Amino acid sequence: MHSPLRLVAFVLAGAALALPAPAWTQAQSLDAQIEPVRVKYGLPALAAAVVKKGEIVAAGAVGVRVYGTNIGVTIDDRFHLGSDTKAMTATLAGIFVDGGKLRWTSTIGEVLGADVPGMNQKLATVTLEQLLSHSSGIPSDTKDMAAAYFNTDAFDYNLAALRLRALAAWRHNEPKEPQGSPFQYANFGYIIAGAMIEKAAGVPWEQLIVEKIFAPLGLRTAGLGAQATTGKLDAPVGHQIDEQGKITPMLWGAAADAPPMLGPAGTAHMSILDFARWAGWNSGQGRRGPAIVTSQTLKLIHAPHVKTPRIENPRPGTPQTGEYAFGWGVVKFDWTEKPVLSHNGSNALNLAKILVDVDNDLGIVVTTNFPEQKADAAGAEVVEALYRGYAGR
């Protein structure tokens, strides 16, 4: 089984009416372009899509749902997004900022202090903005945090309560900012942000993301947790690679995803087409609707808030350099004229990449049901090729 720390290092009102999903045509298939990349890197499956000015102009899905089988993927198959869920959590926060139930400067102590008494004073002063930009002083996943994620409490409490219990278990720790930059990629910070959103809404994060993100955007394949339905191979399943290189498909159950309490940090899944629709809503800065948050709030979510130090040989699913917004990296690649919004996501079994260029109203998404360096390299190769091919059109 994948170790807890190895796993978490990667992640990790009523519903609005759903809008009609943007159309795409099979004539614009990317299958022939991405299949050689899949073969080159030995991936079970690979999918990609391009959305331009709100229209999905190209998409493809190739390979198999389970390594070593001939169960082919389809364009509607669900892929795991990992930490690409974080931008959705930030958008949920924006909804309640717009509604006056939270402020970007709301502190953990103000919102959750009554539920988690005895909190370290410095931890209590950490703001929602700092949590969402990974600049709170809360470190990347530690053994103590992993102990809060992986424990038998899951059988006795709802997920919202488990998030509060995780904070309570860590409440005596003091956040510490590293020298040079306050940035530390912290899944735990997003768990706390999720708990703050839940407190403001009086509704669990899982219900909120379905009602306020998935439904308004018409993301019909979107869900949370492992991609495949228990007992069925109806989606590309994630794969574990052990130290000897052995590949094991992780079909269902607890081993097929991060613990559910990590939802705000990264447990969403959806088809490549729905992932593209999410990218297109962001690349259009919400102008085409639905009006999930105000234009001003979305621009603030997309805006850089902290510089990220350069990380040599980062683990797949974590940003390497640039700046960080709320759930988005802001990165200038060698092949982009300006910084663009970008993020990677992985639960150590799958990998997803998203790029959003608001200047060109362009979104590119890539997913695979395979982890680690080969998946990361394949995804990067596809993203670059698609950007070069579609940014100037």
Image (tube, rainbow, N blue to C red):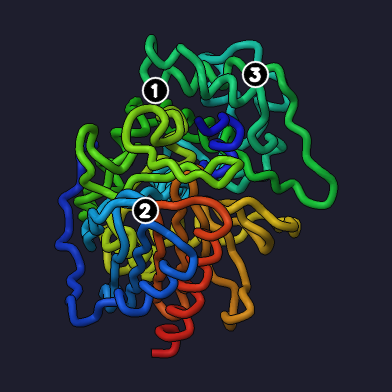
Tag 3, which secondary structure? loop
Of all residues, the one furthest to the right in this rendering is 179
Dot 2 corresponds to which residue?
A: 293
Mark before the other along the chain sequence, 3 or 1: 1
- Name which residue lies at 24% across and 80% down: 28
Marks 3/1: CA–CA distance: 18 Å
Observer-nearest of 303 and 52: 52
Three-letter amino acid code of the residue under disc 3: Arg
Marks 3/2: CA–CA distance: 31 Å
Q: Where is residue 195 in the image (x, y as percent from the top left)?
A: 47, 28
Tag 2, which secondary structure? loop
Against 381, residue 122 (above or below) is: above
Three-letter amino acid code of the residue under disc 2: Val
Marks 2/1: CA–CA distance: 25 Å
Observer-nearest of 339 and 257: 257
- Name which residue lies at 41% across and 36% down: 257
Quick one: label 3, few (<14), some, or many (20+) residues within 10 Å?
some
**Figure disc tally:** 3
- Is residue 151 shown to the viewer in this render? yes
Q: Position of residue 72 (x, y in %)?
A: 24, 58
Mark before the other along the chain sequence, 3 or 2: 3
Q: Where is residue 298 in the image (x, y as percent from the top left)?
A: 44, 58
Quick check: marks 2 and 1 in contact, CB under 8 Å? no
Dot 3 corresponds to which residue?
A: 171
- Name which residue lies at 36% across and 18% down: 158
The mark closer to the camera, 3 or 2, is: 3
